[in-house]
Amino acid sequence: QVQLVESGGGLVQAGGSLRVSCAASGRSFSSYAMGWFRQAPGKEREFVAAIRWIDGSTYYEDSVKGRFTISKDNAKNTVYLQMNSLKPEDTAVYYCAAPQKYQSSLLSVRNLGSDDYWGQGTQVTVSS
């Protein structure tokens, strides 16, 4: 059974940093692309960043470019999202997601949906 478990959320002041983690288990995603999404209260879920396991290539939503960094640890089967220069508008529940069917396209991560694997989410709150 595939599980994605996020951790590391919390409360931080604007301008601060936070790192969230996503530990994957139940299968190998070594050739896949997966990523992070977020959902703020009253808003639709939005794509944040993607990474391809095999070569570490990354892709970011424009609003987080230069502030967020997605990375991976192959040995731990874990994906990270380092968030710097946080803004109140970054406040959201952050979700990790991976495709159910093989795909390695970074752009395709944006289209992950209910048929794919999702974590339970971790709350990130940025105070002004």
Image: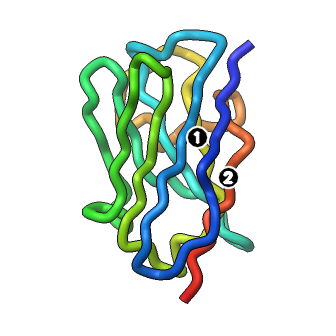
In the figure, 85 relative to 25: above or below? below
Q: Secondary structure at mark 1?
A: strand
- The amino acid sitting under disc 1 is Cys
Q: Position of residue 20 (x, y in %)?
A: 53, 49
Residue at x 38%, y 14% (from the top left corner): 31
Residue shown at 36%/73% (left/top)?
85
Q: Which residue is mark 2?
A: 122
Q: Is residue 31 above or below residue 71?
A: above
What residue is pinned by disc 1?
96
Using the image as rendered, state which of residue 21 and residue 102 is in the foreground: 21
Q: Nearer the viewer, mark 2 or mark 1?
A: 2
Of label 2 and label 1, which has the lower sequence position?
A: 1
Q: In the image, is 59 to the left or to the right of 116? A: left
Residue 20 visible in the picture: yes
Q: Residues within 10 Å of mark 1 (few under 14, many from 20)?
A: many
Point 62% across, 70% down: residue? 11
Q: Tell me how far mark 2 sits from mark 1, CA to CA.
A: 9 Å
Give the quarter of the figure containing the N terminus. top right
Using the rendered image of the protein, determine whether residue 45 is visible from the camera's viewpoint: no
Position of residue 120 measured from the top left corner of the image (x, y, whole percent): 74, 42
Q: Residue furthest bottom?
A: 128
